[in-house]
C-alpha cells in the first residue's frame, strides 16, 4: 500500500479513536444528549472507519466511497464549529487530510490496480 493511502488509513483510525474517547468523556461529564450532539460531528468518521479496513484489498469503489463521507464530514465539522461544539476543527482537519491523500496519483493507481490473484487478465 502506498504511503498516502496508509496515511489516510491511519488518520481515519486515529480520528475515530479520539472521537470515541472524547464522546465517552463528554457523556461522563455532560450527559447522553450532549455526547450524542458531540458524536454527530464525527458521524461520517465512523463510516470512514469501516471503509478504511477495505483499503488493502479493495478497488476504486472504496476510494470513491471514502471520498463522499469525507466531503460530508467537512460540512458536519463546519456546522459543529459554527455551533461552538468543542474540538469541531479536529474532524474538519482529518476529513480534509483524507480527501487530499486519497485524491493523489498514488492512491488512484493503488485502488485501480488489477486484482486477479496472479492470473493475467482475460481480454475478449
Image (cartoon, rainbow, N blue to C red):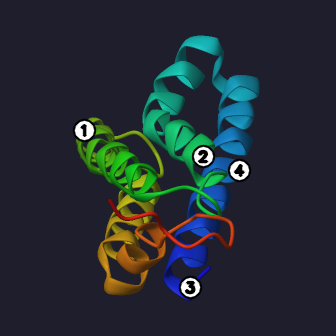
Disc 3/disc 4 C-alpha distance (Å): 23 Å
Say whether disc 3 or disc 4 marks the residue closer to the N-terminus.
3
Say whether disc 1 or disc 4 marks the residue closer to the N-terminus.
4
Residue of label 3: 2
Taking 69 as reference, is 95 above or below it?
A: below
Residue of label 2: 49
Q: Do tag 4 and tag 2 residues touch (Cβ < 8 Å)?
A: no
Residue of label 1: 79
Q: Do tag 2 and tag 3 residues touch (Cβ < 8 Å)?
A: no
Disc 2/disc 3 C-alpha distance (Å): 18 Å
Q: Position of residue 81 (x, y in %)?
A: 30, 46
**Judging from the image, what secondary structure is the residue with disc 2 in?**
helix
Q: Do tag 3 and tag 1 residues touch (Cβ < 8 Å)?
A: no
Disc 3/disc 1 C-alpha distance (Å): 33 Å
Say whether disc 1 or disc 2 marks the residue closer to the N-terminus.
2
| Left or right: 60, with 16 as reference point | left
Say which of marks 3 and 1 sits in front. Answer: 3
Residue of label 4: 17
**Judging from the image, what secondary structure is the residue with disc 1 in?**
helix
| Left or right: 83, with 3 as reference point | left
Quarter containing the N terminus: bottom right
Disc 1/disc 2 C-alpha distance (Å): 21 Å
Disc 1/disc 4 C-alpha distance (Å): 21 Å
Amino acid at each position: 500500500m502506498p504511503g498516502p493511502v496508509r496515511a489516510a488509513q491511519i488518520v481515519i483510525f486515529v480520528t475515530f479513536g479520539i472521537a470515541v474517547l472524547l464522546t465517552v468523556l463528554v457523556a461522563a461529564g455532560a450527559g447522553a444528549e450532549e455526547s450524542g450532539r458531540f458524536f454527530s460531528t464525527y458521524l461520517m468518521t465512523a463510516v470512514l472507519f469501516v471503509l478504511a479496513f477495505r483499503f488493502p484489498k479493495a478497488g476504486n469503489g472504496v476510494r470513491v466511497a471514502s471520498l463522499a463521507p469525507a466531503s460530508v464530514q467537512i460540512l458536519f465539522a463546519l456546522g459543529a464549529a459554527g455551533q461552538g461544539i468543542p474540538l469541531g476543527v479536529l474532524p474538519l482537519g482529518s476529513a480534509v487530510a483524507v480527501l487530499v491523500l486519497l485524491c493523489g496519483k498514488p492512491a488512484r493507481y493503488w485502488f485501480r490496480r488489477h486484482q486477479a490473484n496472479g492470473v493475467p487478465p482475460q481480454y475478449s
